Amino acid sequence: MKTLKWLNPVLAIILTLTLAACGGNTNTAGSADAAGKGNNSSAPVADSGLKDDTTPVKIQYWHAHGDAQIEGLNKMIEAFQAKYPHITVEPVFQGGYDDLHKKLQAAVAAGDVPAVTNVEVASLPNFADSGVFADLTPWINRDEVDTNDFAKGMLQAYAYNGKQFGFPLIVSTSVFVYNKTLLDQLGVQPPQTWDEIEAFNEKVTERKDGKTTRYAFAVPGWDTWYYDPWLINGGGQILNEEGQAAVDTPESLRYVQNFQKWIKDGSMQMGYGKGASDNMRQMFLGGQIAMVEHTSAMLKTYRENASFEVGVSFLPGDKTRTSNIGGAGIVIMDGASDLEKEAAWKFVQFMTAAENNIGWAESVGYLPTRKSALETEEGKAYFGRWPQYKAVFDNFDNVTPRLQHPAYPEFSSVYKEVIGEMVLNQADPAQLMPEAAKKMNEILEDYE
Amino acid sequence: MMMNSNSQSQSAQLIRETTAKADVSPYTSKKYLQWIEKAKDFMFAVPALIFLGVFLYYPLMNSVYISFTNWNMTKPVKKFVGTENYVKLFKNEDLYQSLKVTLHYTLLDVVLTLTIGLMLALLFNVFRSKMYAVMRGIIFMPHYISMVIAAMVFTWIYNGQYGLLNRVTDLMGFEPIQWLTNPSTALPALVAVSVWKGVGFAMMLFISGMRGIPNEYYEAAAIDGASGLSRFRYITLPLLSPMTLFLVITTFISSMQVFQSIDIMTNGGPLQATNAIVYWIYTMAFTEFKTGRASALVMILFVIILVLTIIQWLVSRKQVHYEG
Amino acid sequence: MRDSRMAGEKQHRLRFTLRTVLGVAVTVLIFFPIYWLLISSFKTQAEMRLAVPTLWPKSFHWSNYAEAFRVIPYARFFMNTLVMSVGIVILQLNVALMAAFAFAKGRFWGKEVLFFLVLAALIVPDQVTFVPVYVMMSKVHWLDTFWALIVPSGASAYGIFLLRQAFKSLNNDVLEAARVDGAGRFTILYRILLPMAKPTVVTLGVLTFISSWNSYFWPLIMTNTNNMRVLSVGIAMLRDSIAGDEAMYFHIIMAASVMAIIPIVLVFTVMQKHIVSAMANSTFK
């Protein structure tokens, strides 16, 4: 009996802990209710009673705008608050996309979310799939927003399963940045189709004692974003119509087999791993690579640091000619209150409005997203200052969304590793791809 | 808590007084007083237990539960999936790769940190020399520089183009090495940072251990004509063994959890060459949105560390000499 | 006789000189990355990218520091880091002192099992506990406050273990004497045991301060605004913030890093003697 007395405090602790654990579980059930509530409110047309409501409201805007974009952002927020004096926007920098997403996940798990946030384009399906973002359609319908004014691909990139979850805010795409001074000297044009690449390599590559001293071009190996369009343009697919991995079909292998050939003959440079981006940029600036595929957001850096004239060319095409969208969009969190959501919607509209589009794009160094904005005087002046972007806007409708799939971040790393094996260990990608496809299908099983 | 215990002791006092007044049998009363004493002793452990319970064991139990679901942290519902997460992990060859990387890293880190730390302790254990005190201070310095900063400095030192290290290899007539993007050098490069940060601390502990060894042992050995090496082998090493065990276990546990340097220097790459378990857990939960699977991996890691720690402790218990 | 002694002394001195030469070499080697951090913080972007790195900056570019100051609200972050670190040290030491007292000198049921639970805490990484803790902090509205930065670190298994070892090695007679004199447990702990175990307590306080000052993951997760961020998070954010491309602005990141470590280096240089002797005298068994 006497030992039983001693059990009490211990039992009490264990009980408390267990109860606490159970408490945690009911908490998450609580956020289920919150999500359910959100769904109800997304009727086809949003409650217009709130549209002209001027109750003072403060919203947090979580973003990943780096230092170079802060000035532009602050100007926009100032103008927005002048237009809607009852709304206060508190911008909060949450680090790069990775850190921002991490914090968003934790915030959702805790049921305590900001009203409006950035989301990196490839992660949208994951969040949207969980019902974290508010569907914008009711507001779009209510305020009769002409979404057709957005570049089609850019708008699609922020839709998922037929719902529009956000608008494109800072949009980039991968392009070829080339050493115009050098190519003019050599009398060559950047290749516009795959067929032209061999001839381009022939003329531009320089070798000494069997070693390349100047590469014709470079494609980054560290991010699938750079070669997914090549895979597509070669006639291949990442996933087939049944949702199975198709990276090992002959069509899907065309690009990588070309890469392999070009790397072997010393005309193409491909970097892999951390630091490879910096390496590629320095080689380009130092004249060791004549043309590099990189994000359009880096154009400013290239222009400022190059001792030669910099040109931009759209990715060469074959069966198709596309390039993928990168960057981030602006979305509304479904867990915010209705009042906050209304304010957030006004903010989203303002940030992506046609009349602010050129100024915003130029201040942050990303692409304009509105067709009408390009036609204005302001738009024309913009092209005068940034002639390089013309190559992108001549192909405006070829800028397409990335493959949208919740498992994309996971399975893309599988075929990325094949590229890594090719770059680092001179492995044959055609041999490794079937194994990679198998592994991708195992990952995809979780999503059926 | 302090308040609580005070009032506790006051009430105990009260009970003591009342029980004394209420003429109960001395036997029960003594039992009761003992109970009170033990309860008071226990109260002192309570704050720590509450903190650990709320911030450690509760989250851990929560993870056990989540590891049997397919939760993704942002989804409102958790579906119970049984042992699926565990089965899939054990079927996934990446698990074995990740374990291999983690153990490889840990082994290198523990062995190098301790060996170099001990050698430094022998070298720098000089009394009454201001210069040596300063030198010890400098060697301890990396310990208080944050891993975030250390990892960034080393990233630059390892840089393939402008890095200092490649300048050294260049002077020695070697080709430049892409230290962090080469699968065979990335892991040792990470270990080097950890060893750099850890040796000063190990040295300090070894020195403090050495100073605790009574001089008579060495004097006796000197009379017996023992050489320096055998004095080290038969006196210093055995008497340092409790310290060594402490360092082995703490270094082991922290290297098994290596995360920060990977996050900054390699992101688990290249080709999973540095994809240690905690980093993998992290990407699984946050990039791949698989909180359930990641929690299962946490449990696997937990069990592995626990078992290995207990084994180390049991094996070394026979080797460790405690004075007296 | 005298000759041989002199020869022995000579040999001894030679040995000592060799030892010192080796010691200096090792010290220089270990200090080098810190030196590199320091001089890199004064270089220009162009100088950072020379094929042959310079061992001394061509000229001192204080503008790197100005730039770092512009992006990071240094004073605010410094104060936050300081308050957080001191708070954690005070809380952790008191919790650990009490627990160590209970586990070393107390008698109660389940002591061994509970102590094992305390030690097992060592093997749980932060990365696996923070989601439930974050949810908890959010529920009590502690996110983005010092509470969330300090309270979850209240108990340290490491500290409890070290102090328990220190207390165990102390003689029980003094305690018994005090108890007979009618001293309560708090008096015994804070007036008798604490002074006796001072080296270990100081060492522990210092080590806790270091790890709190440098902690990154926890403050990153638990704070949401610049008002509450700490230096290590600020540096990582700076890295993300300037063009998202660390290699381009490495000299500025280094300047910010120097600013983050200067306070802790100062504290240590001033207190070096005490810390080292405390460490040498503390019980690590």
Image (cartoon, coloured by chain):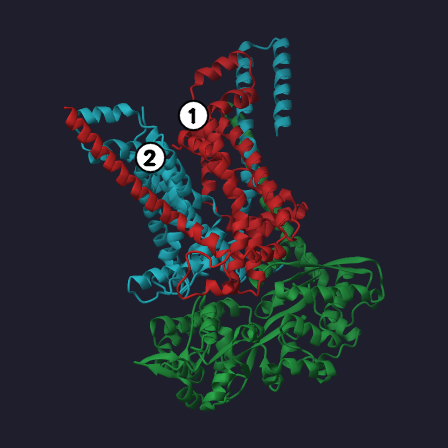
Residue drawn at the location 33% of the way across and 51% of the way down: B108
Query: SS for tag 1?
Result: helix
Residues A23 and A352: in front is A352
Same subunit, tags 2 and 1 = no
Q: Please give the letter of the chain rendered in cyan.
A: B
Residue A19 shows in this picture: no
Chain identifier of the residue bearing label 2 in the image? B
Residue C226 in the image: above or below residue A7: below
For chain C, the rendered hue is red
> Label 2 amino acid?
Asn
Which of the 4 image quarters holds residue B32? top right
Residue C101 shows in this picture: yes
> Label 1 amino acid?
Lys
Q: Please give the letter of the chain rendered in green.
A: A
Residue C168: assigned label: 1
Q: Where is residue A267 drawn, in percent x and y?
A: 39, 82
Residues B299 and A312: in front is A312
Q: Which quadrant is home to the N terminus of chain C?
A: top left
Q: Where is residue B31 drawn, in percent x and y?
A: 53, 16
Residue drawn at the location 30% of the way across and 37% of the way down: B122
| Residue position for label 2 | B125
Q: Callout 1: 10 Å neighbours few (<14), some, many (20+)?
A: some
